[in-house]
Image (spheres, rainbow, N blue to C red):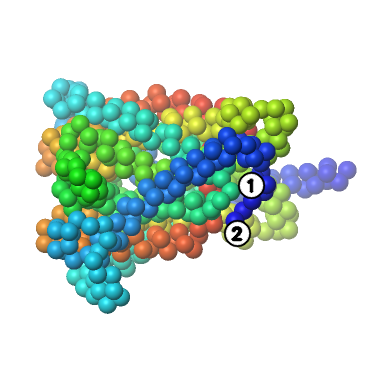
Amino acid sequence: MKACEKKAAKKKLNGKNSLRNEIDAWVLMLPMIIILYLFVWRSTVMGIVWSFFNMKAYSVRDFCGLDNYIKVLTHTHFLPTLFNTFKYVFWSLVIGYLPPLFIAIMINEIIHFKNQFRVIIYIPAVIPGIAAMLMWYYIYYPDKTGLLNMLLGKIGIEPYQWLNNPKFTIIGLIIFSTWKGFASAMLLYYAALQSASVEVYEAALIDGAGPYRRLRHVTFPAIEGVLLLTFIRQIIGVFQVLQEPLAMTGGGPNGASTSISFQLYQYGFNSGGKATGQAMALGVIIFLILIVFTIFYFWFNRKIEERY
Amino acid sequence: MKKFSEKQTGILSHSDLRTFKGKCIYWIFFALLSVAAVVSLLPAIWTVLTAFKDTKEIYEGFNFFPKDMSLNKIGTRLYESWKYLDLGDSIINTIVLSIGNLVFRIVVCGFGGYVLSKLKPRGTKLIFTLVVWTMMMPGQVRMVPNYISWLHFPFAADMGMGVSLLDTYWPMWLGAGADTFAVLLFKNSFDALSNSYVESAKLDGCSNYGVFFRIMLPLAMPIIIYESINVLSAAWSDFFTPLLVLDKNAVVPLKIYRLQLDPRVQMNTYFMALVFSSIPPFIIFAVFQKRILGGINVGGVKG
């Protein structure tokens, strides 16, 4: 009876206030609608539309069909940069994907200095991005003033070229971004590891499961969802790598570290306004390449949310 | 020193730790973590030490530690570098920028997330779908069009009457608001708060705004603090948008980026600039350490 009354009261309240509700809601939401319209929705549509237009610096001229796309795709730099971008993704998965997981598992197991380890390992994530990039620029410095060559010098090895070596430069940038980013991935795994409760481990222990089988059958199921999500997210994120080559190598040596996004930056802001249209065409191309991964990510994310 | 018997059962249990094999695994973990800790710290330590060396030492000695570590020397290096680098203005600029970013992030994304989660007016579904779909789009599609909109705000292209936002902080402020990921994060955390708060407050005669500002916003403090930490520290590391937009009134990250291109700056002074620019984020980290290291599950699986 009481619940019924309450429901009726609520209904009355809602009916009387529904217009007021709508107005209040839209007032609160207005800043978001305006800003998303101006800088996300409109820009996305314009980016796609203008990729079919001739641009003179930053003003729009006439429709030119697929001209921008043809220029981008037939440019001699296109395939090498695309290949470089895949190299970034490949090396980031090889070098950067598993260490955060191992470290999270180890910190979870350790009892001595557990908190100290967590704080120290988080420090690279605290250093501001640009300062860290330039710091590593000097760590990789090709003469003995750089940290790595200084250490090599101590054991009598000649200075190495590091980022100036076209074969190493992408790997070097990926080592940097792994160092910079692995603490936040580690925290994500660490939080997921907490969902495997002590009781489950103890039950497994009583059933006679050794360390390896507990890792395989208790730890792993608790984190496999997050593990796959970070895998896809890393592919999507690294595919758009731009700031590291911009600050640390300038895309060099000889274009060896130029990624697709860096090329877009060059078209858009470093071409004297000659290639603005091509920048937008390249943006659409990046979008088309990534959409497959993104849709899979969202589909999978929903599956995981349903499960937990 | 903690005892092995206090160890909760995980991959290793305390009975494992009594065996030789278990002990081996444990100390291998410990050694690997120590290596990780050294790798995490070494670049930072080297940067600080190099900042206190003389230029001559950097180019000749190639030693890890500076020769002279007296307080006097440290004081002179700090004083001289600070005077040469002249970072005071850019630090104030960065503080202004970061507070503006924070206001925009909370007002735009926080309010919007609340409406999408609780008030749900007509059209919510459409807007939510748009937010999710644009989150899928890589930002590169928008890079040049956004730059063009900054030139002719609020128009998308040259209509002859827009205002240029170049050399102001507006592009960054507006950009801090135009973050669809943050909108979803706010929406998710408002979703986690029970509807009954809203209903009972309304039965007591509270207006929609009263409910939001006096009840829901205080309850959402964890996510607000989480976003504040992110936004405030990001202002000290983002150099990309400032690079496109700012000429005068440079913020610290941009100043650092430009200093590198300036051949007159001595290497030790430059390293001191890196040290100075890292201090504010470290202060934020020191203050909110517990929350940063523990509260990441705000983003959790949904991240």
B31 vs A135, nearest the viewer: B31
Q: Between residues A205 and B61, which one lies in front from this camera angle?
A: B61
Q: Are marks 2 and 1 on the same chain?
A: yes
Residue B23, position in %: x, y? 57, 40
The amino acid on which the numbered mark 2 sits, given as a three-letter code, is Pro
Q: How crowded is mark 1: few (under 14 residues within 10 Å), some or many (20 or more)?
A: some
The answer to which of marks 2 and 1 sits earlier in the sequence is 1
Is residue B253 in sight in this rendering?
A: no
Q: Name the residue under label 1.
A: B4
Host chain of mark 2: B
Q: Can residue B11 be seen in this view?
A: yes
Instruction: Give the vertical position of A202 relative to B267 (above or below).
Output: above
- Look at 15% across and 54% down and name the residue there: B261
Question: How far across and down, in percent of the image, does residue B278 sit?
Answer: 34, 60
Give the position of the C terminus of chain A as an image quadrant: top right
Left or right of B45, for residue A251: left
Number of the front mark, 2 or 1:
1
Query: Furthest-right residue in view?
Result: A1
Q: Which chain carries label 1?
A: B
Residue B253 placement: quadrant:
bottom left
Q: Residue tagged by mark 2?
A: B218
Could you tell me the amino acid type at mark 1? Phe
Q: In this view, does A116 lie to the left or right of B156?
A: right
Q: Which of A205/B261 is in front?
A: A205
Relative to A91, is A4 above or below? Answer: below
Tag 1, which secondary structure? helix
